[in-house]
Structures are given as structure tokens and as C-alpha cells.
Amino acid sequence: MIINSGFEVAQPVDAVWKFFDDIPQVASCLPGAELTEDLGDGKYKGRVAIRMGPVRLKFDGNADIVSRDNAAKRIVVDASGADERGRGQAAMTVSATVSPASRASAKGGGTRVDVTQDLQLSGAAAQYGRGMIADFSAIMMRDFAANMADRITRLQRGESAEQIAAAAAGGSACGFTLAIRAARLALARVFRRFFLPYQPAT
């Protein structure tokens, strides 16, 4: 399953690209993700906890930086893992490209991050359709963008990673909250698809 998404950050391109140098910092911006071990040479162990509908999953696995192109400002990461209770597996290749945002949308400056996820699911998570998974991914990307912008700003102010983590702990989104927001997004899409076309002309 290919999921394309993108977002803009009100930070310079070089600052955002430099931020992608620090994978633990990047992972800390993704709701439910946690790196548990740096294996060296661009390889990490970690876990991701998600909740989709009534199913709560926690994947333990590995992430590997496959390539990093400084000229094109593009990074590719392979990640795979299995649910700790044996209810499913996930494998994903993520590519992110950093580029200047358009002047109109960035209001004078900023960075565009385009993300492509090639996702393969099995087990409990695979029962959900593409729409639900895409909605869940969209919510996570929005939170990731907001967390990244906040973290870069805090780092530029001289705050340590520990200070930032402590501040984020109290306001991080839980899996249940993400699931509710994704469900609302799905309901809005269904409403637009089936009801709006039948509204009487005014």
C-alpha cells in the first residue's frame, strides 16, 4: 500500500534537513514511536504503539537508514516489526524529501516535506481498509509536523533534548486520541461522498 502525504514547516530548509540527521529526535516527533537502541551504522531498534478501532498494537522491530542524499535532501528508511502478542506484522519503506515551500503557502519562507510510505500489514491491522489506514497516517503526519516545528524551535533556543522530552511527555497524543481523530476524518469523508452530492440546489 502506497500512501503519499506532505506537510510544511515554518523553518528554513537547512534547519529541517539538519534535524533529519538526528534520527532519535525525528522518532520522538512521531506519536507512539520510541527508539530503544542505537545499533550503529544507521540502524536502530525501537517500538511503535498504535490503536486502530478496538485493536491496540505494539510493534517491536528495527529501522535502517537505506540512503541519505544530501544534494537532493532525500532520506529513505526501511522499518519492520512484529506485534508483541503475535497478532500481526508490519513492514514499511519511508522516503522523505525536503524542499523550499511555495511562497504563497509558506508566507515568506518555510520548508515542504513530502513523504511516501510503502506499507505492508498482516494480521489484526490488515483488516482495516486503505481509507482508514490513510486517515490514521494523515493524522500522524500532522502531529509529526507540529512536533518537529516545535522541537526545532526549542533546540534553536538552546533547550536540551531532555528538557524537550519532559515538556512533550505531558502533551503527547495517545493512541486512543489518534484513533478517534482518524475516525472523525473518515466519517467526514463518507459524509461528503454520500450526502453532499444530493443537496438541493439553492
Image (cartoon, helix red, strand yellow):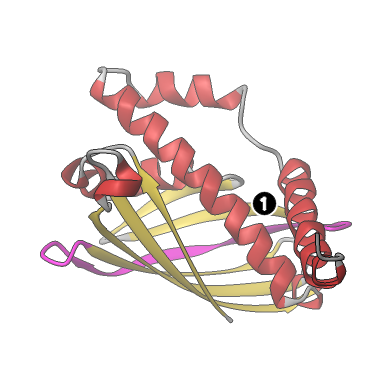
Task: Name the quarter where the C terminus is drawn.
Answer: bottom right
Relative vertical location of residue 107 with respect to residue 54 in this rendering, above or below: above
Q: Is residue 87 left or right of residue 165?
A: right
Which residue is under mark 1? 49
Name which residue lies at 85% across and 58% down: 53
Q: Is residue 187 visible?
A: yes
Between 153 and 45, the one lying in front of the other is: 153
Q: Is residue 199 left or right of residue 164?
A: right
Relative vertical location of residue 119 with respect to residue 175 in this rendering, above or below: below
Q: Is residue 56 visible?
A: no
Query: In the rendered structure, does residue 44 fall within the stretch colored magenta?
Result: no
**Image location of residue 77, percent across then percent down:** 38, 67
**Looking at this rendering, what residue extends furthest in the left direction?**
71
Task: Name the quarter where the N terminus is drawn.
Answer: bottom right
For label 1, the SS is strand
Between 129 and 46, the one lying in front of the other is: 129
Name which residue lies at 23% across and 50% down: 17
Relative vertical location of residue 165 with respect to residue 102 in this rendering, above or below: above
> From which residue to which does the magenta span run?
51-73
| Residue 124 image-quadrant placement | bottom right
Q: Main secondary structure of the magenta part?
A: strand
**Image location of residue 108, percent across then percent down:** 23, 38
Query: In the rendered structure, does residue 62 fall within the stretch colored magenta?
Result: yes
**Image location of residue 42, percent across then percent down:** 29, 60
| Residue 12 image-quadrant placement | top left
Name which residue lies at 10% across and 65% down: 71
Q: Amino acid at mark 1?
A: Ala
Name which residue lies at 61% across and 32% down: 172
Between 170 and 83, the one lying in front of the other is: 170
